[in-house]
Image (tube, rainbow, N blue to C red):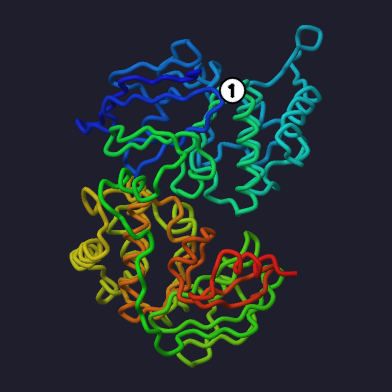
Amino acid sequence: MTLLAATNLSKSYAGVRVLDAVDFDVRAGEIHALLGENGAGKSTLIKILAGAVVPDTGDVVLDAGRLPIGDPLAVRRAGLSVVYQEFTLVPELTVAENVFLGRERAGTFLHVLPFLHRAEMNRAAQAVLDELGIHVAATTIVRGLSVAHQQMVEIARALVSDAKLLVLDEPSATLSHTEVDRLFAVLRRLRDRGLGIIYISHRLEEIFALADRVTVLRDGRTVASVPAAGLDRAVLIRWMVGRDVSEEFPARHQSPGAVVLEARGLAAPPRFSDVSLTVREGEIVGLAGLVGAGRTSTALALAGALPAKGDVRVNGRPAHFTSPADAIAHGVVYVTEDRKAQGLFPLMGVDANITVTYLSMFARAGVLSLAREHTAAAAAAREYDVRAATLTQPVATLSGGNQQKVLLARYMLKRPTLVVLDEPTRGVDVGARAEIYGLMNRLTAEGLAIVMISSDLPEVLGMSDRVIVMREGRTTGELTRAEATPERVMALAMAG
C-alpha cells in the first residue's frame, strides 16, 4: 500500500532549478533509501515533505490525505516526522521532556494553575524506549547520553507523535559499527510494524544491508527508482555521479620513504594509555578501532592539542608539542572530524577559511596584504578543486565535500610533513569521496605522510598502506595492506 506519494515536485532558487518535476513514493512497511550527491536535491525534497519549504509545483499525499504544504507542525501532526543529522534535542532536559517537547501533557489545578503530567509523560516515554529496546531511563538528562542513545531519543519522539512515516537523514554518521547494527535492528522492527521509512546515507554498504527500494536523484531529477535487491554497486554509483567511478578506492603504488613520525608509549590517561606507531614519507597509516578506543584523542595528542607523555620523534628529533600552533610550526597538522564546529568559520568566505592559519605569510611589518592573501587563496582553491561561486562565498554554503577540500587547502598552504585526517569523508557524497581519495594519493606521491582515522572500515582497508588497531586506549596490533581484512581488524579491535 502506498503511504506517501509526491508528484511533480519542482523548486527553484534565484532562477536555479534544484528540483525538477520529481515523483517520489513510499510504501507502508518499507525502508526506502534516497540517494544522490550533495546538491542533488535530497534536502530540498525532504524539506518540502516536512513542510519547511513550499514547492513551486507539485502535491504530496500521506495516507490518502493531502499533506499540508509549508506547515511543519501540521505535517508532524499528520504523521510525518524527520530526524535530522543535526539533533534538535535540548541537552539540559530529560529524555521524557525532550520526547514530549512541544506536545506536553498538561492540566490545570483547580481549573486555574497549569501543571505538567510529568509522571504520565515519563511512563509513556519509557514505554516507547522499552519497545525500541533502548536501555535508558526516561528521567535521564539528555546531555549525559551517548550519540547513539540521543539518536534513539529522536526516533522515540517521532513514535510518540504517532508517526506513520519516519525520515532519517544520515543517522549513522557518528555511530560505531555496533551502534549502527542496533539502529538497523530498531528500523527493521519499525518497518515490520508497518511504518514507512525514508533513509538517507552516503554509506552505500548501509543501503544494501537495509533498504527495500532505492531512489536516486541527480541535478534535481529522478534518475532511477528500483528495488534494492540485486542492485549493482557500480551502477548505483554511476547513477549518482553521472560518470563511471569504477574504482571506489584508487590503487596505491607509493614506496614509503624515511620515518617521519615515531611514537612510543604515548599516554594521556584516562583517554588512552599506551599507543605506539610509526609513519613514513609517502605512506597512509590507518588508525582503526571502535568508538571510544582513543583514536581521536591520540590524534589530538600528536597535534599538540592534548597534553600527553611518551616518546615522540618527528624526523628523528624529539618532539613535545605544547599547542597546535607548536605542532604546525614543526610540520604536523590535524584536520578535525567535526569540520562544522571545530574546523571552519562558517560565516567567513572560502578565501578567509583557507588562509586563516597562515596569515603571517601575507604580512609585512605587521600589515596584512589582502592582495597577496587573495592570490594565495585563489591558487589553493584551484589546486584542490574547491567549487564555489566566488572566493568570498560563505563556506557554510558549500557542500560537505567542498568544505573538506577547503580544510585540506588550508593546511597544505604551507606544506607540512605529516597530516592527521580524522574522518576525512564523513558526510561527503560518493563523488567527492573519490576526489578526496585522489588528493590523498597525490599528496603521498609528493612525500607527505598521512595518519587517517576512519569509522568506515572499507575506507580504512581501501586507502591504508598499514593499519594500526586500537582498543580501550591501547594499540593492539598492526597489519600490512595485504594482511588487513575486516575480520582481522575487528578481532584486534575487540581483543581481550
Q: Residue at x 65, y 52 (%)?
A: 178
Instruction: Measuring from the top left, give residue 183's x and y in whole percent.
Output: 62, 42
Quadrant the C terminus occupies: bottom right
Task: Name the amino acid type tagged 1.
Answer: Ala
Q: Secondary structure at mark 1?
A: loop
- Residue 258 lies left or right of residue 243; in this view the side is right
Instruction: Name the residue beneath numbered marker 1.
Output: 163
Instruction: Measuring from the top left, give residue 262's x and y in whole percent.
Output: 53, 86
- Residue 373 lies left or right of residue 122; in this view the side is left
- The foreground one among 217 and 300 is 217
Instruction: Measuring from the top left, give residue 71's x and y in whole percent.
Output: 45, 18
Q: Residue at x 36, y 47 (%)?
A: 396
- The foreground one among 462 and 366 is 462
Instruction: Measuring from the top left, give residue 334's x and y in whole percent.
Output: 46, 69
- Residue 147 lies left or right of residue 405; in this view the side is right
Q: Residues within 10 Å of mark 1 (few under 14, many from 20)?
A: many
- The foreground one among 408 and 247 is 247
Can you name the residue that lies furthest to the top here? 111
Q: Is residue 413 above or below residue 81?
A: below
**Residue 350: quadrant of the picture:** bottom left
Total marks drawn? 1
Q: Is residue 74 above or below residue 347?
A: above
**Residue 333: quadrant of the picture:** bottom left
- The foreground one among 101 and 188 is 188
Q: Residue at x 54, y 78 (%)?
A: 322
Q: Is residue 146 above or below residue 460?
A: above
Q: Is residue 355 above or below residue 301?
A: above
Can you name the residue that lies furthest to the bottom here? 316
